[in-house]
Image (cartoon, helix red, strand yellow):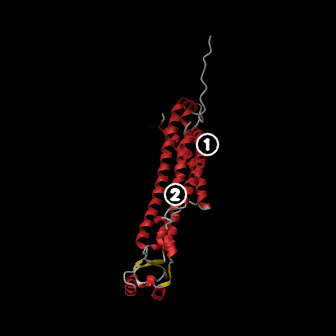
């Protein structure tokens, strides 16, 4: 009489459906890290733009004006501008400084000094009670016809709007990554439940509660999520340093430096932990809802 062989139930915390879960979580954490770092860097760049240009304006004196050709006339113009209500200081920029401003566009060429460039005056204003720009323009037109007053507000507002839009897009990317991770974990968990359906029925017959089954899956998901999150962060860090190196080579004040403060690095370090917790919670909710619908 031959003995009937019974197959041992497969442990619930081991299944082929979750084989690629750490890799998928790693990809999600990698993308979230890049998006979060980019959003933080754009926020600091916007703050730098706002701080650097708020409370300042620039006056362009035409090259053919007397003030642009004669230092005595320029000193008199500076005195008039400084004495204007709401202005706290005015400084005429040297030709070398103007050439340095044009160097990113024209290159390091000797002919820049030969061009009929306008003289620039950097004006510092009182943020609490700034000058009347229209009155200042009228006064400059009397002293140096053709002079332009640029208060930077129009293009600064556009740059700040761009920076804020990038920050919002980064937040949306992080939210989409979290949403995609939840869907992915739910799908993998359902596959695991289907693979162990017979084992789960046997556990129910011997008195196991749904919470016990859910605990097996959530512990499995927590372990995989943490490993995948650490892998994603390990891949994101060298990528961020590479992007930072490339941005430093460009050396442009209009691009973010991608330099993170210590508390910002802590946010990136917490991403693997957050990914593991999201993976665990999603797995538990999926298991409990699926088992509740089982007969």
> What residue occupies the far top of the structure in this picture?
1
Residue 208: x %, y % from top left: 59, 35
- Residue 281 in picture, x, y percent from top left: 55, 46
Whether residue 284 appears in this view of the structure is: no
Q: Residue at x 53, y 65 (%)?
A: 44
Q: Is residue 44 left or right of residue 140?
A: right
Residue 163 seen anywhere in this rendered image of the structure: yes
In the rendered view of the protein, which quadrant contains the N terminus?
A: top right
Q: Is residue 237 above or below residue 208?
A: below
Tell me where residue 267 appears, x and y as whole percent.
58, 57
**In the rendering, which numbered label is found on residue 223?**
1
Residue closer to the observer: 122 or 48: 122
**What label does residue 38 carry, if any?**
2
Task: Give the quarter of the image for residue 60.
Answer: bottom left
Q: Crowding at label 2, few (<14), some or many (≥20) Cα neighbours within 10 Å?
A: many
Circle 1 Cα neighbour tier, 10 Å, few/some/many (<14 / 14–19 / ≥20):
some
Q: Nearer the viewer, residue 251 or 49?
A: 251
Q: Residue at x 51, y 72 (%)?
A: 52
Give the camera-side residue of 167 and 206. 167
């Amino acid at each position: 009489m031959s003995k009937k062989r019974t197959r041992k139930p497969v442990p619930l915390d081991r299944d082929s459906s979750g084989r690629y879960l750490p890799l998928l979580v790693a990809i999600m954490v990698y993308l979230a890290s890049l998006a979060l770092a980019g959003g933080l860097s754009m926020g600091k760049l916007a703050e730098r733009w706002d701080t650097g240009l708020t409370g300042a304006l620039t006056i362009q004196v035409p090259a053919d004006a007397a003030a642009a050709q004669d230092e005595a006339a320029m000193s008199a113009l500076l005195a008039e501008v400084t004495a204007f209500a709401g202005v706290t200081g005015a400084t005429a920029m040297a030709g070398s400084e103007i050439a340095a401003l044009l160097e990113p566009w024209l290159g390091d060429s000797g002919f820049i000094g030969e061009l009929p460039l306008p003289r620039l005056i950097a004006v510092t204003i009182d943020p609490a009670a700034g000058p009347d720009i229209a009155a200042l323009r009228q006064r400059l037109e009397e002293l140096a016809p053709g002079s332009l007053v640029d208060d930077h507000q129009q293009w600064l507002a556009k740059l700040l709007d761009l920076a804020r839009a990038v920050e919002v897009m980064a937040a949306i990317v992080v939210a989409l990554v979290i949403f995609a991770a939840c869907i992915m974990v739910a799908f993998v968990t359902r596959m695991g439940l289907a693979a162990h359906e017979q084992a789960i029925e046997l556990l129910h017959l011997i008195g196991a509660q749904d919470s016990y089954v859910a605990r097996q899956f959530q512990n499995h998901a927590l372990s995989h999520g943490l490993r995948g999150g650490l892998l994603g962060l390990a891949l994101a860090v060298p990528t961020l340093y590479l992007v930072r190196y490339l941005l430093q080579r460009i050396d442009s004040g209009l691009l973010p430096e991608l330099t993170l403060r210590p508390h910002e690095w802590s946010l990136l370090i917490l991403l693997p932990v957050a990914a593991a917790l999201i993976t665990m919670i999603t797995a538990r909710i999926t298991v409990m809802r699926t088992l509740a619908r089982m007969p």
